Image: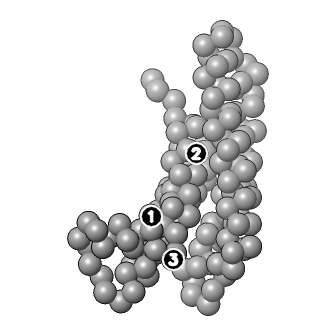
Amino acid sequence: MIRAYQNATNPSAKALELIRLLMLLLVLVGWVMYPLELLLLGHWAESWQSKMPFWLAIPGLVSTLLILFDRKTPWIRLFFIVTMWASVLTGLLGAYFHVVWNFDDEVNWKFEKAMEAVAGSRPVLAAMAFTHMGVTGLLSIYRAE
């Protein structure tokens, strides 16, 4: 991404590459800050599901750093894309687990009850941060033909 920004030949291409670079840098910061926030909040529980964001942060950080310096090597690009899709899936599953937990053993998908569960004691939006990082990462390397 850095090389693409440096090699941009006109103002429009330079602006587009700058936007892509900034989006990728936001993802990079997210891979460091979100697991740190979860650690500070004591998210580390006994279940394997609560450890998934921490385990995903390792390849997320590595793949984002690699794509930052080399986005054309096929295995780096594939590693990054797979990691970003894993982040999207982890965020969606985490949000689902948080909502179900917030139902307090009485699952009711009617609008009012579902909205109460979304705003419950376990924040659903925190899990969705991983979906946001994955989507932003995927958008940062998308190139229209």
Which residue is tagged 1? 92
Q: Quadrant of residue 49?
A: bottom right
- Name the residue: 56% across, 64% down: 126
> Is 78 rendered above or below residue 23?
below
* Label of residue 121 in the image: 3
- Give the image location of residue 128, x and y in percent: 50, 60
Instruction: Name the quarter where the C terminus is drawn.
Output: top left
* Secondary structure at numbered mark 1: helix
Task: Judge whether 11 appears above or below 139 on screen.
Answer: above
Q: Look at the numbered disc 3 and give the secondary structure of its residue.
A: loop
Seen in the picture, residue 51 relative to 66 is either above or below; the reply is: below
> Which circle's residue, 3 or 1, is located before the other in the chain?
1
Give how far apart the Cα atoms at labels 3 and 1 are.
18 Å
- In this view of the protein, can residue 90 be seen by the observer? no
Query: Looking at the picture, which amino acid does disc 3 mark?
Result: Ser
Q: Which residue is mark 2?
A: 137
Residue 107, position in %: x, y?
30, 82
**Disc 1: CA contacts within 10 A as few (<14), some (14-19) or many (>=20):** many
Counting from the top left corner in percent of width and height, residue 136 is at 55, 44
Identify which residue, 34 or 72, lies in the foreground: 34
Q: Earlier in the sequence, mark 2 or mark 3?
A: 3
| Dot 1 amino acid type | Leu
- Label placed on residue 126: none
**Which badge, 1 or 2, comes first in the chain's sequence?**
1
* Residue at 57 percent of width and 87 percent of height: 47
